Image: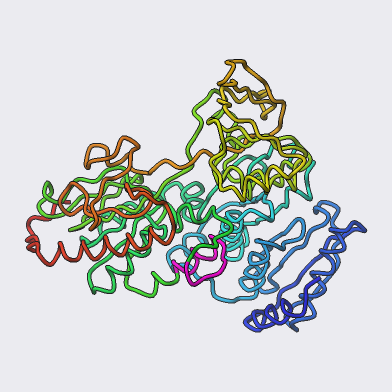
Amino acid sequence: MLDATLKSQLQTYLNNLQSPVELVSYADDSVKGQEVYALVKDIAELSDKVSHTEGSDSNERVPSMVVRSVKTGSEIRFAGVPMGHEFTSLVLALLHSGGHPIKLDADIIEQVRALEGEFRFETYVSLSCQNCPDVVQALNMMAAINPQIHNVMIDGAVFKEEADARNILAVPAVYLNGEPFAQGRLTLKDILQKVDKNSGKREAEKISAKAPFEVLVVGGGPAGASAAIYAARKGIRTGIVAERFGGQVMDTMAIENFISVKATEGPKLVAGLEEHVREYDVDIMTGARVVSVTPADVVGGYARVELSNGAHVLSRSVIVATGARWREMNVPGEKEYRGRGVAYCPHCDGPLFKGKRVAVVGGGNSGIEAAIDLAGIVEHVTVLEFGKQLRADEVLQRKARSLPNVEIITEAQTTEVVGNGERVTALTYTDRATDESHTLELAGVFVQIGLVPNAEFLQHTAQLTPRGELIVNERGEASEIGLFGCGDVTNSPYKQIIIAMGSGATAALSAFDYLIRTPQPFAEQKVA
């Protein structure tokens, strides 16, 4: 199952086990069943601290495997073969079950350990989903800490009937004790806020009690990471506040234009960014978004930043790096069927539509790339482009047109997503050349029509473009004193990772220049 290189790497990791781990396989004669058995057998042969038994419990999913801590009795399950993006989840489950320290703050570990009651999580994934491992690993860590918490990763492609029965058309999808719990991106803090009702209040109080920052970066993507590093290297008090670290890059699979790196993937790049930021004295606050910013010249020399969890933060300067999000079609049925046939990530959700008919709305690079990816999985892909011609690069257009199961329709205006109350069944569009309405019977709609800047919280604070972008000059300065911007949230003409990083550095250097030319506020001027 594992090649020699992977075995060697895994054996090195398993040397960190401090206590025994038992692997239990539930396999049958199917291809996936034999793969699970072979994988478990290979792992057990790499360490004398890992044992393998064949399970007989009729209630377990087949094929699957259980990672059990002999010392604590904690159990972590994988239904399917945890390879692809989920192989890292398996390795971490082994290490954490074997007593290797979990890289979480001590207060978070104690909070998880103190949870009372039984929590049985089921996490549906696809092995091509780059967001799924974050959710799986967060729940697995909780299970390793508290034996009353259990999590099973379920490959929706392997357990298709089960996924269909629960109408799961977008991943990750999490169930708790048999009931829907969450869908999409989810951090460990998000999970704790949902299961520990007082955690949000405690976190808000903790954040509000922090001393004022000199530079506060709002956003944790490439621009925000760059800005934080450049600010921290100046030796000034620096903080980052973001819903999650990584931003849109977490949803990007192939990155081939990041200079000096021939090819990488978004989650891998984000992991490197976060590791780099943590090398410096940067206070990272995740799990909350900014809802408003009051400029420094209004609050006695400190900008006041309000967060969605009720907390507030003070800082002498603020760098906005909130990036952008997927643009929505804003047609009837889109919101109603989001996660039930309407999707925005072909890499994540594509495998759930295997053998079905789907549409991709958008004829730019992202839309045509999505169509090419999906063509290898689904029965048929229809690309709907609003304009008279596609906007994607010619090389991508040639590839898409060469695929027999890809149809391209231009001058098509999507008017409605149709469903049966449970999932998408069709899409209607208007031919802009003839004004005729058409209906496509399909199971999924992948929306790829560009990005919207995350700058709504600034609409009463700073000058924005008609498209909602924060207006900054060549130094990254916004219209308000002490406010700076960088990356895709700004009016930068090119939305590229490497450009966002450069603009983050520019904004940080400009903020530092502003600070050294601005008097330090007196203590009595600080507004709580």
Whether residue 173 is visible here, answered yes or no, is no
Horizontal placement of 447 versus 128: left or right? Answer: left
Which residue, as the protein is rendered here, is positioned at the far right?
A: 29
Q: Can residue 78 be seen in this view?
A: yes
> Which contiguous range is marked in magenta?
259-274
Choose between 44 and 68: the one closer to the eye: 44
Q: Which residue is drawn at 49% across and 46% down?
A: 194
In the image, what residue occupies the spot 29% across and 39% down? Answer: 465
| Residue 55, horizontal then vertical, whole percent | 85, 63
* Left/right of residue 415 with respect to residue 59 in the rendered view: left
Q: Residue 25, relative to residue 126: is it above or below?
A: below
Q: Is residue 235 magenta?
A: no
Q: In which quarter of the image is the N terminus?
A: bottom right
Counting from the top left corner in percent of width and height, residue 80 is at 77, 56
Residue at 93 percent of width and 58 percent of height:
29
- 213 relative to 120 in the view: left or right: left
Q: Quadrant of residue 235?
A: bottom left
